[in-house]
Image (cartoon, helix red, strand yellow):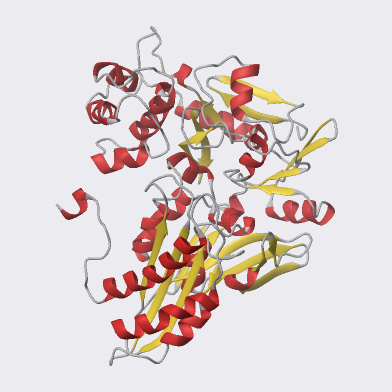
Amino acid sequence: MNDSIRFILNGEDIELTDVGPTETLLDFLRLKRRLTGTKEGCAEGDCGACTVLVGRLVDGKLAYESVNACIRFTGSLHATHVVTVEHLAGRDGALHPVQQALVDCHGSQCGFCTPGFVMSLYGLWLTKEKPGRREIEKALQGNLCRCTGYEPIVKAAEQVSLMRPSALFDPLERTRSEIIARLWAMQASGTIRIAKGEDRLIVPASVQALAEVLSQEPDAIVVAGSTDVGLWVTKQMRRLSPVVFINHLSELQSITESEDGVTIGAGVSYTRAFEAIARKIPALGRLIDRIGGEQVRNMGTIGGNIANGSPIGDSPPPLIALGATLTLRSLEGQRKMPLEDFFIAYGKQDRKPGEFVESVFVPYPANSRFAAYKITKRRDEDITAVLGAFLLTLDDAEIVTDIRIAYGGMAATPKRARMVEAELIGKPWTEATIEAARPAFDTDFQPLTDWRASAEYRQLTAKNLLTRFYLETVGAPAELKRFEEVA
């Protein structure tokens, strides 16, 4: 049937024919299914109280990921398995080992955030047998607690790795084969279209179908991860229609590596892109680890971050510095361009009616030095105030033969510092050269003041990031590292 959204909720098949395009999974769970273990805290994907697992078929295998139900639209769930905290108890009502560990380690006080922590730790428990402290902290980046100080929760995660009864105990391991078969049976044979009053949602059956939909609906809102669009609804109360969901399209999920670089499909999440990127471009991998929390990285896509065109998006500046190439697609075919040319003005990108982002090619920084620095008020799970990215090529005499510098948070779009680059090219890579180039920032950028940072702070920070990059390239210990990284 192509007029309904079908998915599995815990153990039950769900079929919805009257779902609106901006109805959230959190509201569906709490208001329509009375599954109140999933909490609403921030309604913007920040606190993790609403964390659930969503399982989907990836290359024929069933993969579960933690997501924020508060900004995940129900219309994006076709052919998935949604798992809430209520599903974890054993057949006899016994607590799951993850839950029991939190009890034993006193990991819950007021209890409001606890179900979200349970689900994040459960997702980690499913994928890592013996996670280290750093892996545990990464899994919990997207969960906030005001009571415990986190140490009891981390200890619970360490303890639960030792508590692994037979697979028959765990509800997901016990039913994995059955769930895979049920999800296969739910795959849509054609494009799904649902209208609820004047609101419409569309789930294209393929990339070709997506091109056809957008040729007919050029003003449609295309949603991949909804990590930003979700806030348009929960915070700005915007009414969106029609909404086209693309997170299920396998053709946009490819990661293709070559000798020169990696091509990332527009539907690839940060989590899936991390391994390929971090292996070849470690500095970019470290940046991805600071984009939101685990739930946001599981939902958000690099293609969506580019298409959104935000001046504080985290991926465009480093990709521009690396010389990335963007591929757009429509019924007329493909169109390629340097990524930096895609951003025209605030809220305006070089995308023709009916076009969508298909992929981005990221060159490897061979024989060059690359760095990216994200400046925020808190280290993890925070929106960027300033982000600087640098790609430097020197000759044997330490003369700058090429340098690409791009910033976010400094202009209406992600932008190259071309005057600064011009001051550096052809000069010796020395502290004196850097100091002489710093005034050129005042020509390249005239940043704004907002609640994240003042214009003066942004301008000084941008200059200092260039100095930091220089110090690191000559061996100075300029980059702050975590204790366990240097111990």
Nearest the camera: 268 or 403? 403
The structure residue drawn at horizontal position 29% and vertical position 88%, both measured from the top left corner, is 398
Residue 71 in view: yes
* Whole-percent x, y for residue 325 in the image: 56, 71
Image-based side of 332 in relation to 70, left or right: right
Give the residue furthest to the top: 92
The structure residue drawn at horizontal position 62% and vertical position 64%, both measured from the top left corner, is 412
Q: Give the vertical position of 36 relative to 380 (above or below).
A: above
Nearest the camera: 226 or 236? 236
Nearest the camera: 455 or 101? 455
* Whole-percent x, y for residue 197 in the image: 85, 30
Q: Give the vertical position of 28 relative to 245 (above or below).
A: above
The structure residue drawn at horizontal position 40% and vertical position 64%, both measured from the top left corner, is 372
Q: Give the vertical position of 26 relative to 305 (above or below).
A: above
Q: Quadrant of the N terminus?
A: top right
- How many marks overall? 0
Nearest the camera: 128 or 347? 347
Image-based side of 221 in relation to 133, left or right: right
Residue 364 in view: no
* Whole-percent x, y for residue 362 in the image: 49, 68
| Rendered image quadrant of residue 446 | bottom right
